[in-house]
Image: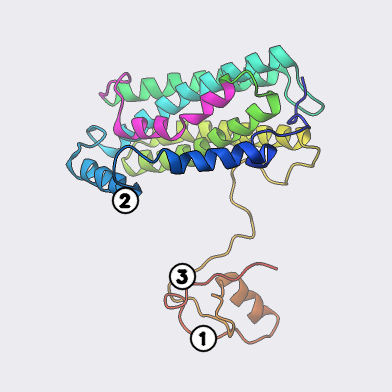
Amino acid sequence: MRQSARQGSNRTGIMAAPERAKQMVEATREFPPSSPGDALAIAEVRIAYAQEGEGMGETPRLLMDKLGERLAFEHAGARLYEALLSKHRAYGSFEGGPSGEDVLHILTEEYEHADFLSGAIKNLGGDPTALTPAADLALNISAGLPQVLSDPRTNLLQSLEAIVVAELADNECWTALAQFASQAGQDELAEQCGVAIEHERDHLRKVRMWIAAGQGREAAAGDGAEMPEDEYTFSEDSPVDREGYVVSEEERAESRETGGQPPTGTSGKDRPARRDRK
């Protein structure tokens, strides 16, 4: 199977059949909506539901809520890689793409993460089968991903593009969970989260590499979701240059080292524009 989108005539656009498109527009005038109102009325109903409705549930504390979130997401992630493994077995890989063993290795680590989280919730006196509010939210946010993987029309490369969305979220949320555990005095849990973070960074690096290979380009330098080394540091009191761009601490230090005058101007809290790195 082709690992890129099929090249050919795309018949989904309206210009593919201009006469029929004209008839469709005319039909909207002949058969107007059967009820009054517009999108503003729909918005009013949504606002009323939001104000009167209940929340997404309750949880004893934030750490337990986030543990439930990660458990639900790891279960969902495992199902994504199960589907990806099926894609691989059905269509094969491509040059520079994953082997079946590669996919199975990540899938196994997703299972291990879920087992670890389930045990952690039990150790803290919680119920790993409970759907916490954060878990409910996370599953709703990522609901489109399994649809992509289960669609028989998507190939391995397109499925990997869905997987990378899950991996980006995984890296972000595992880091947050480690911080919550540390703040709650759960040092052993935080340390175990650190191991999972290394796994997830490796997953993200590999998926990015496979996507790049499938698209015929080189993978960007970097190791997983780590922050780039040239990240700028700003504060509310950062000065602004003559063009109105906020000057970072790194740029000010560089200016002092080269003997230049640090830019001056309005405080960054008044002009929060950011200088683009050149």
Image location of residue 155, percent across then percent down: 69, 23
Q: Earlier in the sequence, mark 1 or mark 2?
A: 2
Q: Is residue 127 magenta?
A: yes
Q: Amino acid at mark 1?
A: Gly
- Residue placed most toward the observer, 74 or 137: 137
On the picture, is 25 further left or further right than 180?
right
On the picture, is 39 further left or further right than 25?
left
* Mark nearer the viewer, 1 or 3: 1
Image location of residue 193, percent across then percent down: 46, 33
Whether the residues at callouts 2 and 3 have beta carbons within 8 Å, the answer is no
Q: Quadrant of the N terminus?
A: top right
- Residue placed most toward the observer, 52 or 229: 52
The residue drawn where x is 65% and y is 75% is 254
Label 3 secondary element: loop
- Residue placed most toward the observer, 5 or 146: 5
The residues bearing labels 1 and 3 have C-alpha atoms spaced at a distance of 14 Å
Residue that badge 3 annotates:
235
Q: Amino acid at mark 3?
A: Ser
On the picture, is 50 further left or further right than 196?
left
How many C-alpha atoms fall within 10 Å of the one at disc 3: few (<14), some, or many (≥20)? some
* Quadrant of the rendered image containing residue 89: top right
The residues bearing labels 1 and 2 have C-alpha atoms spaced at a distance of 44 Å
Residue that badge 1 annotates:
265
Q: Is residue 140 magenta?
A: yes
Residue that badge 2 annotates:
40
Label 2 secondary element: helix
Q: Earlier in the sequence, mark 1 or mark 3?
A: 3
Q: Where 31 sits versus 264, above or below? A: above
